[in-house]
Image (cartoon, helix red, strand yellow):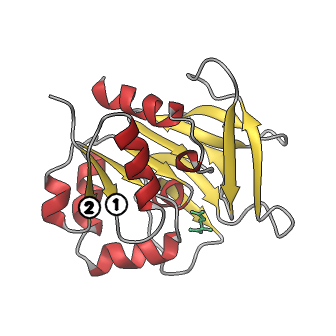
């Protein structure tokens, strides 16, 4: 049986992740409650506004259950705001913003500055063969610290990481669901199966 993939659906870019999974032949479960979280084998944390998602996780009683699942090794894909939520440390966050420490990285929010608020580029991503991955960045975070157990999968021109993996947790600063390319989702799903 194929694993059940959830998408955290409190705020943000939920639909396009669901569409990417559908194109890969998988139904996605939208997760807004602890009961829904119990039904999934893996979770996508989408882009959006990490401080708002953090607040909604607490309001919905989902923060602790999700933290427990992640600590138990549930595979997770975090894109943009989702990356921020999975990180160990958040720089330039709101004072009350929480994160899961599911991957040993520190990230800086909105790290590309005004001129580069939003931009697109092509990136080589470790584990993805063939043409470079077209990466869309929108008020994106960057990785400022990479812990010893973390694999850097992609960097931008200044050498800083924008995609990382630790165990079954994969994070990207960019939005793979905005490109037609399904290879980042496939890379994540190969880790779910493993
Ligand atoms: N800037 C947003 C944040 O801090 C992330 C942007 C995004 O997910 N596209 O949460």
In which quadrant of this rendering is ligand 1 seen? bottom right
- Label 1: which secondary element: strand
Earlier in the chain: of badge 2 and badge 1, it is 1
- Residue 93, compared with residue 172, is above or below; it is below
Is the residue marked by circle 1 packed among few (<14), some (14-19), or many (20+) residues within 10 Å?
many
Residue occupying the far top of the picture: 129
Q: Which residue is drawn at 37% across and 32% down?
A: 189
Residue 51, position as x, y percentages in the image? 50, 75
Label 2: state its secondary structure: strand
* Left or right placement of residue 32 versus residue 121 in this view: left
Position of 35 with respect to 17 (left or right) is left
Q: Mark 2 touching mark 1, by CB under 8 A? A: yes
Quadrant containing the N terminus is: top left
User: Nearest the camera: 3 or 55?
Assistant: 3
Q: Position of residue 49 (x, y in %)?
A: 53, 71
Q: Residue at x 38, y 25 (%)?
A: 190
Q: Residue at x 26, y 61 (%)?
A: 31
Query: Is residue 102 depicted above or below 82 in this figure?
Result: above
Location of the C terminus by quadrant is: top left
Residue pointed to by mark 1? 8
Residue occupied by mark 2: 31
How many marks on residues? 2
Residue 187, image x, y percentages = 46, 29
The one nearer the camera, 148 or 116, is 116
Mark linked to residue 131: none
x and y percentages locating residue 120 in the rendered image: 75, 49
Vertical comparison of 167 with 87: above or below:
above
- Residue 90 in view in this figure: yes
Q: In this rendering, does residue 102 appear at all?
A: no
For marks 2 and 1, give the CA distance: 5 Å
Query: 11 or 150: which is nearer to us?
Result: 11
């Amino acid at each position: 049986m194929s694993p059940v993939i959830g998408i955290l659906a409190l705020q943000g870019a939920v639909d396009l992740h669901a569409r990417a999974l559908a194109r890969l032949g998988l139904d996605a479960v939208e997760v807004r409650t602890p009961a829904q979280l119990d039904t999934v084998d893996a979770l996508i944390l989408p882009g959006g506004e990490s401080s708002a998602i953090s607040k909604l996780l607490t309001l919905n009683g989902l923060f602790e259950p999700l933290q427990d699942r992640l600590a138990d090794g549930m595979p997770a894909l975090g894109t943009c705001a989702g990356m921020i939520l999975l990180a160990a440390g958040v720089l330039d966050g709101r004072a009350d913003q929480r994160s899961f420490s599911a991957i040993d990285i520190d990230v800086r929010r909105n790290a590309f500055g005004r001129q580069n608020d939003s931009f697109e580029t092509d990136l080589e991503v470790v584990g993805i063969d063939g043409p470079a991955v077209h990466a869309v960045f929108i008020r994106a975070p960057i990785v400022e610290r990479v812990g010893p157990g973390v694999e850097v999968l992609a960097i931008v021109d200044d050498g800083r990481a924008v995609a990382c993996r630790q165990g079954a947790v994969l994070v990207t600063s960019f939005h793979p669901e905005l490109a037609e390319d399904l290879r980042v989702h496939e890379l994540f799903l190969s880790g779910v199966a493993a």
